[in-house]
Amino acid sequence: LGMKFKRFYLLIFLCLFLTPFVALAFLKSVIEHLATSRAMTIMDSGFSSAKDADLDRYIIELSGVYHKKYMEKNDENFWLKFHPYRFILTNSVITDFIRLESGTLETLSISGHCDSIARALAFGLRLKGFDAAQFNMVNPHSAGHSIVQIKLAENRKVVVDPYYGVYPISEGKLISAEKAKELKSLAKAPQEIWKPFSEHSDFSFYEDFENVVFQDQHGKVLLHSDIDLLGYKDITIGIADGKNNDLSAELSNSVLNSYWTYLGHRYDRMFVRSMA
């Protein structure tokens, strides 16, 4: 009788212990199913190119659909409530059993910042069989930004920007961020390299793209600053008052840059600072 009770209590303990994990796994399955259905609905709307006919045109049209959908964003979307917890729900340290795939919540909301629409588009592209992921960039003189990088056959890489609504072209083909930076360093205007998805497209981030540093998602983005100590007694940024509102503005106007203090999840916390 004692052994039976031990087994019974052990069974109760296991049920109580496993129930939350089973519930989380079920919730993950439901959310990813909803995101997949939502992505397929988005991609099936206003889409004409055949994937096998012209791969570049297919990617451009699909990305344009996401850009235009983002321009219709609803900031009252229910799924936006989960955005503050994405760094937990999609964190790589969480087991696959309960971790949400990157881009699921963003697909359901189609709102937020550049990283959100980038992950949503990458999620849709992966559903179509592409190797796509968020691609992080920083202009040391202005801002950080996220777009989408797609890896194609023969080690070819191309990028598209669903947030600002542009994509880089050379000789009629999509190109990589590296190639776009190379072309910009030849003093080309951004409109000669980047083409618009819509009348809402914005080229401002790419005005001095030759200065931008970038890296694959989860890769280290190096932020380097050269400091001439001659003439400097010290360098003081901001006020020691427990607040950070003054730091970005003062860093932008200093010998450093505004992302020296950035610790957010948007760029995976993979900034590496160096000073010489």
Image: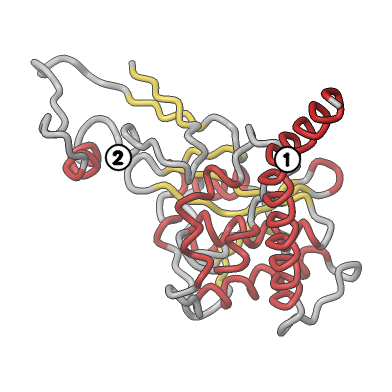
Q: Position of residue 33 (x, y in %)?
A: 75, 64
Looking at the image, which residue is at 72% across and 62% down?
Answer: 30
Identify whether 247 is placed above or below 22: above
Label 1, on which residue? Answer: 18
Q: Is residue 11 left or right of residue 91?
A: right
Mark number, residue 44: none
Q: Does 20 sit left or right of 54 as displayed?
A: left
Q: Residue at x 52, y 38 (%)?
A: 268
Choose between 37 and 202: the one closer to the eye: 37
- Name the kind of residue labelled 2 in the image: Ser
Q: CA distance from mark 2 to mark 1?
A: 45 Å
Q: Looking at the image, is 76 positioned above or below residue 139?
A: below
Q: Sequence-wise, which precedes: disc 2 or disc 1? A: 1
The kind of residue tagged 1 is: Leu
Q: Residue 190 appears at what percent x and percent y?
A: 48, 60
| Residue 271 position within the rendered picture, expressed as x and y whole percent measured from the top left | 45, 31
Q: Is residue 182 above or below residue 200?
A: above
| Picture quarter with the N terminus | top right
Is 89 in front, or is 63? 89
User: Residue drawn 48% across and 38% down?
Assistant: 213
- Residue 144 x/y as whole percent: 42, 47
User: In the rendered view, does 191 fall on the left or right side of 241?
Assistant: right
Query: Residue at label 2?
Result: 258
Q: Name the residue at the right extreme.
A: 52
- Other-residue count near label 2 (Cα within 10 Å), few / some / many at <14 / 14–19 / ≥20: many
Nearer-the-camera pick, 87 or 55: 87
Badge 1: few (under 14), some or many (20 or more) residues near its Cα, within 10 Å?
Answer: few
Kindly report which numbered mark, 2 or 1, lies closer to the viewer in this rendering.
Answer: 1
